[in-house]
């Protein structure tokens, strides 16, 4: 298993941390084409966890994500 160093100075890490702090709703599209919506709870070097509308936690490998965008 490849573990990369978690670098909070990277813009992508900062952006996701802001989404966590704001408890903002996001749309997360996977490379498979599936779209998940919810709030980002946490991230680590390999995964992101979101809570869906039913407060069910979903852990997603970062390598499976096409994009993350805030919902309006």
Image: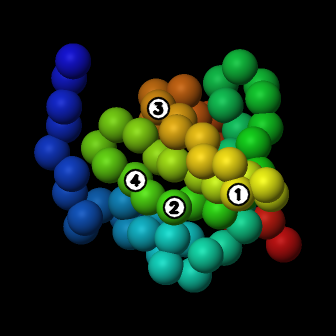
Estimate the spatial distance between the alpha carbons at disc 3 and disc 4, rounded to whole Å: 10 Å
CA neighbours of label 4 inside 10 A, class few (<14), some (14 to 19), many (20+): some
> Which element carries disc 2, helix, strand or loop?
strand
> Which element carries disc 4, helix, strand or loop?
strand
Q: Nearer the viewer, residue 12 or 56?
A: 56
Give the residue drawn at x 80%, y 57%. 53
- For label 4, the residue is 43
> Which element carries disc 3, helix, strand or loop?
strand
Q: Residue furthest bottom?
A: 22
Residue 5, quarter of picture: top left
Q: Nearer the viewer, mark 1 or mark 4?
A: 1
- The correct choice, above or below, for 29 with respect to 63 in the image is below
Q: Nearer the viewer, mark 1 or mark 3?
A: 1
Residue 31 lies, in percent from the top left, at: 65, 24
CA neighbours of label 3 inside 10 A, class few (<14), some (14 to 19), many (20+): some
Q: Are marks 2 and 3 in contact (CB under 8 Å)?
A: no
* Model colouring: rainbow
Q: Are marks 2 and 1 in contact (CB under 8 Å)?
A: no
Give the residue drawn at x 68%, y 49%. 56
- For label 1, the residue is 55
Estimate the spatial distance between the alpha carbons at disc 1 and disc 3, rounded to whole Å: 19 Å
Estimate the spatial distance between the alpha carbons at disc 4 and disc 2, rounded to whole Å: 7 Å
| Pointer 2 or 1: first along the chain | 2
Res 69 visible: no
| Pointer 1 or 3: first along the chain | 1
- For label 2, the residue is 41
In the rendering, which numbered label is found on residue 61?
Answer: 3
CA neighbours of label 1 inside 10 A, class few (<14), some (14 to 19), many (20+): few
């Amino acid at each position: 298993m490849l573990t990369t160093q978690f670098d909070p100075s990277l813009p992508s890490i900062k952006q996701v941390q802001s989404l966590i702090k704001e408890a903002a709703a996001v749309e997360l599209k996977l490379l498979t084409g599936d779209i998940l919506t919810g709030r980002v709870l946490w991230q680590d070097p390999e995964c992101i966890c979101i809570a869906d509308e039913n407060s069910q936690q979903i852990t997603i490998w970062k390598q499976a994500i096409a994009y993350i965008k805030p919902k309006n």
